[in-house]
Image (cartoon, coloured by chain):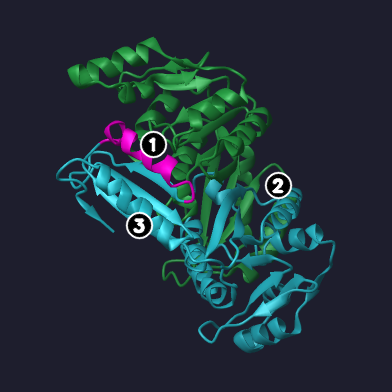
Chain colours: A cyan, B green
Amino acid sequence: MRPTRTAAALIIGDEILSGKIREANVFELARVLRERGVELARVVVIPDTIPGIVHEVQQLSKAYDHLFTSGGVGPTHDDVTIAAIAEAFNVSVVRDPDLERALRDHYGEDVTENHLLLANVPEGVKKLWSARTPWPLTVLDNVWIMPGIPEVFRMKLEIVREHLEAGAPFVTRSVFTKLDEAALKPFLDETVSQHPKVAIGSYPRWQDPKYETKVTFDGTDRNAVERAFTDFQQKLPDGEPLWTE
Amino acid sequence: MRPTRTAAALIIGDEILSGKIREANVFELARVLRERGVELARVVVIPDTIPGIVHEVQQLSKAYDHLFTSGGVGPTHDDVTIAAIAEAFNVSVVRDPDLERALRDHYGEDVTENHLLLANVPEGVKKLWSARTPWPLTVLDNVWIMPGIPEVFRMKLEIVREHLEAGAPFVTRSVFTKLDEAALKPFLDETVSQHPKVAIGSYPRWQDPKYETKVTFDGTDRNAVERAFTDFQQKLPDGEPLWTE
């Protein structure tokens, strides 16, 4: 069985912390990582400042197999992610000739030095390409440098999906019930103690007419997940569960 | 002028990290904090495990004026936030008599010990009430213990809004333009260097027919913000900005 791989996400965004916009990239990233068998273990949102980004990149890239940064990669004064990642790895910022050529092709005669700032990268990045996107994704060591704009983030996620080495795939089963968490607790406690290899979660809804609580069974051992899922259902009273997924 | 106050948010949620649900509470919290003149400076999302929560609560409650936790406050095995916050402050978990009475009133004869688990709190919490919500919000030291369910989180935010001491209010102005970031860069760089007390942000849109870039001016000094906002607009070419807010 493949080992479990872990990831962290570092969201660089004054605009999220100040409540100007709703963060939109973590959910998309979490789903792709999950699909690839990589466990997203930590997300941190910080302002657009170099010392803060340097510190987090150093900590997170050491502690997890992969780090995904989002934001701060444009050409203006508040785009400091490239400089900070370079500093975190003690390398220079250099002009990448492939990216420069792509930018010159794109802007033609109107190209300016400010457009070409987008070709600046930390020295030593790998460039990952996909047939489905016009621009590459740059990766320094285990740091995947993603843009903040959600539409562009999603495009680059396609490159992540193609290139990220797969870990042990996750299996999830879900049970939907009209019982509340207090009523479910004895059945949950029994199941948890009998199935230590399975992560069991309980999620109440707020005034949802369809169901009261969703119980999830997660793990990388398909048989163990299925046994916990089945065992839990057999403990429930008549008429339960409402349905399973 | 009132001093700037800072806050951090700790989101406790396996279901967010595994991509099962989209995080929904940070945006709501960020807006209320902003409105109250409190700067949200860091958000961390971690799994539902006691050691991880204890560590983060200790770090974040020391480093910021306020810490808001979200999630893990139900009665089941995966609800470990109360125990973890108690451990972080080296206090016991105790049954709160006011909360117990409220739960007994709510459930009547059907009340069980599992319902009453919701009355367990770290010893020494303050309870904050609002006329607009049936349940209090519990706060230990500077840690505001919020629920994870978005509907209930929003109800308790009303209590935060009523009780959180106000800091220096933030002022924000915005300029919308059809120029791209590369074209705006010289005007931005000049404005940034001339107005060091104002936080200036530049946010490009992706294929939005209405505008290309939004530039924001933020600070607690209203006059400084207005001067930077006006000064920047005067640098722009004819026909710009498209509009301001």
Residue at 60% in and 64% down: A3
Q: Residues within 10 Å of mark 3 (few under 14, many from 20)?
A: some
Q: Which residue is mark 1?
A: A189
Question: How many C-alpha atoms fall within 10 Å of the one at disc 1: few (<14), some, or many (≥20)?
Answer: some
Residue marked by disc 2 = B195
Q: In terms of depth relative to the viewer, which is nearer, B150 or B4?
A: B150
Residue B220 appearing in the image: no
Give the residues in magenta: A180-197
| Magenta-colored segment: predominant secondary structure | helix
The number of numbered discs placed on residues in the rendered structure image is 3
B156 horizontally vs B196: left or right: left
Q: Which mark is residue B50?
A: none
Report the residue marked by disc 3.
A173
Q: Amino acid at mark 2?
A: His
**x%, y% of residue A62?**
73, 55
Q: Is residue A38 above or below residue A16?
A: below
Is label 1 in a helix, a strand or a loop?
helix
